[in-house]
Amino acid sequence: MTSETSGWYARLDHECPERTSQIEVWLDSWLEATRKRQPIAATLPNSWPTLPAGLLSNPGNVLDHLLARFDAQSDGRSPRGVYAPPARFVDAVLYDELHHGKSQKKEPPATLSLAALPPSFRTFARQFNENIREDDVVEEGSSESVKNLTVSGIPIPFADPCVGAGLFAERVLRIHAERLADYSPTERREDTLRLLEGLQLVDTSEVAVNSARKRIVIVLARLGLVDLEEDGDDGKIGLNEAEMIVESNVRCIDPLRGEWPWNERPMLLISRPPWLRIKDRFRGHPDGSILRKQLSSELRQFKGADGKTRFSAIKGNVNLYRLYIERALQISQSGGRVRLVVPSSVLREKSSLPLRKLLVESNGWDSVWSFPEDSRLLFGGSQGVSVIGVTVGEETDVLTSFDPLMRDDLASGSGLNPEAPFFELERGPWSSWTDASWAVPKMPRDVMNRNRTIAAIGNLADKPRLIEEGTGLNPSGRAIKVRVGEAERSTWKKEICDWDGKDGQIPFIRAAHISFIDGEGVLRHPAFESGAGAGKSAAWKGPMDMSVPTRIVCQAVVNPQSERRLVWAVVPEGCVLGNSVSFLDLPIEVTDGLRESFGSLEGGLNFLASQLNSEELDLWSKAWAANNNVNNYEIEMLPFEIEEGGALFTLFRNEGSLD
């Protein structure tokens, strides 16, 4: 967002601090501007700041942003840096689903496009076969297809369980009107009524529901489909009739804990559920802690009308978007389509494993779009953005992963540009690669690096994991553990100081002290390297018993711009480890074996670090990274194999003895 537009919101807060009033005034002004056929700037209160050009052309985007700021404030979060999905992004998702859905993959019937017919024949052709449309093809003879589609090709019922201010609904209506441009006024009116009656839109917020209701009516009026002044005519729906239908089909309920209020299940569900952990709810509420615990407990134990626990995929910190994914699959009809905009972490994080199993093993998960943090989609904040596409109740055979995508990969008037990078995951190899955890690898954009990553995954997938027992590295009966450095900086901040080189200082090791230079991990700390940087917060003056023996460590926090993700180094005895590094807690049998083979523990750990710093392992780690942290479970599951007596093992040992 430009400084001009963000500055306008700041000035608006000064003039009108009540956020619900901001939303109400904006909607009233938008409605009045529509009625008078004026720009919205002409109908805003005189006391409001002058509307910049960047906000003048899309009143809906301003409404989405105003509601996002209201929601953030309601949860106790900062409204700064809160963004709604841009219309261009939503259009791409909708166009992709409507143009390239499952029904579009069938061979089209042998019919002519209406555009190929003389104008005098078009009306007759429509009456003869209502399911002929210029943009969509319905399988001939399929009455079910006609029943579940408007003439404009929108599957109904169309649902959004987190309707917000109605962004997805607005864009659907615009596509609907665009497709009916050449139809008669009566046909447009009748099909619009059918679409409105097929909407199933809900939200937990009264403010959001009221906003969505008003927005839908305003947009319909702007599209020439609703009459704001009269009772309607052959080509327009009357205002009272439109408001009555919209009020019935946009409802305020909690879809997670309530029952779906319509008898017919959605045929198409598209939404952007809230990306919010339970522990981040009610931050501004005086009883926030109690409310968070109650909500978390209720959701974990909630039972539906069938008496079964509603959410089977809850694990770890409960994030609402995960629950909405599972709920969307429950409320949609078998064979229906679900498209959800979610954080990319769902594709690889361990706590989403039960959810991925549900997507793959009980449904047809066929597509995912992935936009990394630097894709310039502001509404993702510091997180990557993904769009998952699922056919409810079908089988997953192949998942097509479009990754990594940038904003420029969004095509105008369709889904993604044909040049957008993609990768297909066939179920058999995919299961083998991930031990049936169904994680989706993160791929580089250029072809050469993609091929290198695929080759690395193929070479490493069948190797034993680092923590496995009975391997060349760990023949004992005790597993290797991965732990985080003992000194948490916020807890021990008074015991951490800058390095000044005076006697008696103990080195404090952070992730910033570990570098990858000339193919190996190097400890760049002023205690061990004259002139090394990172002297700030590099010394420990706390309890002496916090110092540790020689350890092999890895960065636990990674700069996303760094060329490498995994960097291993050996920390000598007598240092204190910060919690931005992880280390291997090796069984005594492993350390004894390394001493015996290399003459010293440090020599053995250096050998181990050289193997863990391999390019293949780094490519593997990048492919399966859930976020910018190198999580302990990620290290534990690194494919790693050393054969005692192998050529590489022997060579390194001999070189070490020569030194």
Image: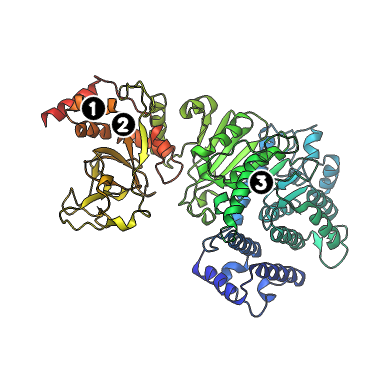
Mark 3 neighbour class, 10 Å CA radius: few under 14, some 14 to 19, many 20 or more: many
Disc 3 element: strand
Q: Is residue 348 shown above or below 246?
A: above
Residue that extends furthest to the bottom in the rendered view of this protein: 46
Relative vertical location of residue 250 with respect to residue 101 in this rendering, above or below: below
Q: For the residue carrying disc 1, how many other residues have a C-alpha within 10 Å: few (<14), some (14-19), or many (20+)?
A: many
Going from N to C along the chain, the mark reached first, 2 or 1, is 2
Q: Is residue 501 visible?
A: yes
Which kind of residue does numbered mark 1 sit on? Leu
Asked if residue 248 lies left or right of residue 372, the reply is right
Q: Which residue is mark 2?
A: 586
Residue for point 66% across, 46% down: 270
Distance in Å between CA atoms under marks 2 and 1: 10 Å
Quadrant of the drawing holding the C terminus: top left
Q: Describe residue 77's horizontal placement relative to residue 101 as left or right.
A: left
Is 59 or 654 nearer to us in this picture? 654
| Residue plotted at (62% across, 74% down) | 16
Q: Amino acid at mark 2?
A: Leu
Measuring from the top left, give residue 601's x and y in whole percent. 21, 32
Residue holding disc 1: 594
Query: Which residue was labeled with disc 3?
Result: 270
